[in-house]
Amino acid sequence: MSIKNVLVIDDEPDICELLEITLARMGLESRSAQTVADALQTLNAAQFDLCLTDMRLPDGDGLEIVKYIQQKFPQIPVAVITAHGNVEAAVQALKNGAFDFVSKPIDLQLLRGLIESALNLKPDQSIPAEAAPQNDQPVLLGDSAAMQKLRKMITKLGRSQAPVFIQGESGTGKELVAREIHNAGPRADKPFIAVNCGAIPGELMESEFFGHTKGSFTGAITDKAGLFAAAEGGTLFLDEVADLPLNMQVKLLRAIQERAIRPIGEQHEHPVDVRILSASHKNLMNEVSNGRFRQDLFYRLNVIELKVPPLRKRKEDLEVLAAHFLRRITAQWNMPAAILTVEGLEKLKTYDFPGNVRELENILERACTLSEKGLIDAAALELPESQPQNVETPDSAILVEDLANREKTAIIKALEETRWNKTAAARLLGMTLR
């Protein structure tokens, strides 16, 4: 097995020496460059398995190197070194394809974890459209153009450590997408911890995320490791992150920025190595505009946004999805095999699935119970005649907000015209005052 080779790019001799000593102690070889020009020449002259670059260099910046490597040597993970507190530079580098970043002064434990993760990257592997489930784990199914695009993005995002915000309606499979991103990267053999942020009582939230020590509050009868500690080395998936209360958003932001947590009852912070993925069915930018979500946390979570298509936008996947669910349902219930008829499939194609893939599974589960001889026809599906609108989608949320704003404007205008006489204003608007 050949020794891995790392390119270090920094014009500060002390930093270069620190990085080279750390790499040598990890059994790695290294070469160094002090300028952008020197770095590009070195990249073209030798093969490297990893690049560590400072963001500020005498003849340019590390972003140039990130872009160059993405274009010429996309197989080489590149991590950037930023000044303490320069989050904007780190986010910009991540958006342009950097694997991860580390801030000065360099925490050697975090640096070693970053290097190990980067060197564990596997060559790009596409996610098969109809992969067989392992251990009854759900998989992303479908070969529509929308799903092919989604799988390509998952493969690409798996090779990065950038935070990803997964946008999608309820029932589209956002947690499944997050798990696939985790499995596509170097953290695949480490924990994947998913948490529904809206399901944790407010008074327990800090303890759940960061842990606590025995006796730190009433009821703390033992030490407890929080979700960050449970996900150490792996991925923490924050589902329905828009439901976090504002006071918890502040604490989460600090943990993400500092890469450290302080359990309740402890005096000192502990470094954590966790990749953050998050999701919501809500339009997070609207939540920011309405003061319900912190803008600074939004930008830390939404470095890259990944949109999961609703089922109505990929109806060509209905056949393979239905076959998969019917196999799973009948196996779980020890039932004879069930088959969706052509008539049944055509009926499904006329439905818009406001509840998305989750609703499809529920429909088929009910149909399996009611059907005779294992044939699922249109009648067995019992689809509703009138389809409820998915008010949770971003487009619907925007329409509701726009309507509310128009109503407010009309009311204010009527009040101004009637010199703030509420009865007269109501009459002008065709309303009754109650």
Image: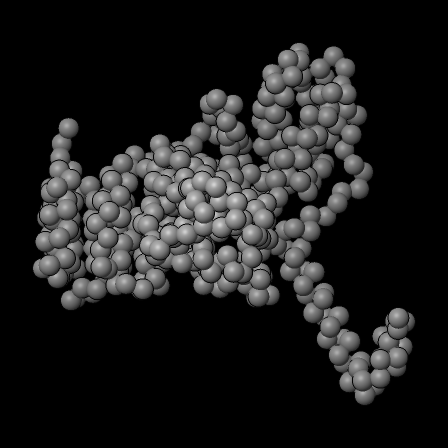
Figure check: 25 above or below 102: above
- 256 or 211, which lies in front? 211
Asked where in the image residue 363 lies, by quadrant, the reply is top right
- Residue 364 position in % (x across, y down): 69, 26
- 129 or 121, which lies in front? 121
Q: Is residue 26 left or right of residue 129?
A: left
Image quadrant containing the C terminus:
bottom right
**x 24%, y 53%: residue:** 107
Asked where in the image residue 357 lies, by quadrant, the reply is top right
Image quadrant containing the N terminus:
top left
Q: Is residue 114 left or right of residue 257?
A: left
What colouring method underlies this structural image?
one colour
**x 26%, y 43%: residue:** 113
Q: Is residue 56 left or right of residue 307?
A: left
Query: Does residue 361 appear anywhere in the picture?
Result: yes
Query: Does residue 151 appear anywhere in the picture?
Result: no
Figure check: 42 above or below 193: below
- Residue 347 position in % (x across, y down): 73, 31
**x 60%, y 33%: residue:** 316
Asked where in the image residue 372 lies, by quadrant, the reply is top right
**x 55%, y 44%: residue:** 196
- Residue 8 position in % (x across, y down): 15, 51
- Residue 118 position in % (x across, y down): 27, 42
